[in-house]
Image: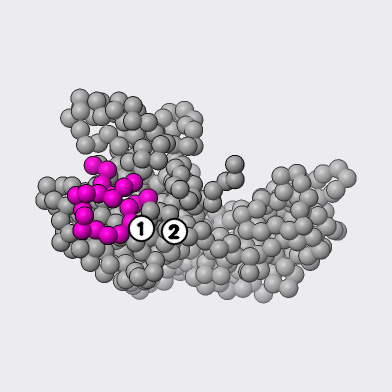
Amino acid sequence: MAQKPHLNIVFIGHVDHGKSTTVGRLLLDTGYIRQEEIDKFRAEAESKGKASFEFAWVMDELKEERERGVTIDIAHRRFDTQKYYFTIIDAPGHRDFVKNMITGTSQADGAVLVCSAAEGVQEQTREHVYLSKTLGVTQLICAINKMDRQEVGYKESKYNEVKDELTKLLKSVGFKVDTQVVFVPISAFKDDNINKASPNMAWFKGPTLLQALDSLKVPEKPTDKPLRLPVQDVYTITGIGTVPVGRVETGRLKVGDKIIFMPGGKSGEVKSVEMHHESVAEAIPGDNVGFNVRGIDKNDIHRGEVAGPVSNPPTVVESFTARIQVLNHPSVITAGYTPVFHCHTAQVACEFTELLKRLDPKTGQVAEENPQTLKTGDAAIVRITPRRPLVIERFKDFPPLGRFAVRDMGQTVAAGIVDEVKKRE
């Protein structure tokens, strides 16, 4: 059977607005969990006095199992619509969301923002909207949930009120509401407007949530950009020679291309390209390949280097300015702090040379010039100097090479994207 096109989707929004319930309902309505499982959760939820929680429990139960190390069939986090198969990027907490969005190989192709009709826009609604925009989400579905709540009563006026509030917020951070955003009133708990149009909201003429998901578009592969291929490993294969392995992020890799590995600066001609143990003439973004380059020795290249065309080599930086979010730091970050930056396949110690601006995490507006310190929860613009040569690109030119995570003491302390680079001479 031919595979349906695939999309990654992330569910965002304030903690109590019904993300888990919405995901649980979608999995039930598309046949990825069975009604018996839901009934079991319902009985359990009722016995604990939490009757309306059964869907949320599905996700929590899976999370529990994951934490206990039981492997769960990935199908639980996948569902199919008529047109696509979706993978849900799992981001239960706020910090997980930021970390997965920035460092995950799973970049979201679209987001579903769940916002309660009863409570309207909250703190985290704002932060998630701003972050999604910053991280390059261009397609958004706003699911206005809990339309069944007593104080909402499936009323069109209540839906419009929250829709207007969201529209203002989305425009303020730069979403084009007319072309990039779809609004759907739903009750995930009562199954209104998820899979079929709800008789309780006959006034609504738009799509159901599943139809809205099918209206998303598969993003174009950036084949028109210059090649960027971060090296994951380097092998020596008898009869072939040195074979670097990695994933094409942008551009194309073709037999006969003249490429250069940066920061090392070794170059040569591509003799062969292999994918899944078969020779191919060219590889495009998303392809994981091994390739052999004439005249390159195993010790010439290393993990963390990036291959690109000789005519447009990957950028090695002296320093760069970045927009970061501090996720989890035990004290404060000051100028001089030198943790390890993880960018594509590279891991390099980098110094926070200058704290330029503190930003409002909900809007991205400047809140303070030249702050002395940054703490957990802060958003900021900073200048960073790598301690050894590093390839990193501007996020707007090469998104996969313009994102990074900052790790220290065994945890992700911050994550960010690159605004500007100062090239190394």
Residue at 44%, 47% in the rendered image: 81
Front in this rendered view, residue 376 or 288 = 288
Reading the image, the residue beneath label 2 is 216
Question: Looking at the image, is 388 positioned above or below residue 245?
Answer: below
Q: Secondary structure at mark 1?
A: strand
Residue 100, how many percent across, how many down? 46, 50
Residue 28, how many percent across, how many down? 36, 37
Q: Secondary structure at mark 2?
A: loop
**Secondary structure predominantly adopted by residues drawn in magenta:** loop
Task: Kindly identify the amino acid type of the residue bearing the numbered disc 1.
Answer: Ile
Who comes first in sequence, dot 2 or dot 1? 1
- Determine crowd level at label 2: few under 14, some 14-19, many 20+ residues with C-alpha closer than 10 A: many
Q: Which residues are magenta?
A: 190-210
Structural distance between the alpha carbons of marks 2 and 1: 9 Å
Task: Kindly identify the amino acid type of the residue bearing the numbered disc 2.
Answer: Leu
Q: Is residue 142 left or right of residue 146?
A: right
Q: Which mark is residue 141?
A: 1
Residue at 82%, 44% in the rendered image: 237
Front in this rendered view, residue 374 or 285 = 285
Q: Is residue 219 left or right of residue 215?
A: right
Q: Which mark is residue 246?
A: none
Query: Is residue 156 found inside the magenta-colored segment of the image?
Result: no
Q: Is residue 201 left or right of residue 134?
A: left
Q: Are marks 2 and 1 in contact (CB under 8 Å)?
A: yes
Q: Is residue 17 visible?
A: no
Residue at 39%, 33% in the rendered image: 33
Query: Is residue 207 found inside the magenta-colored segment of the image?
Result: yes
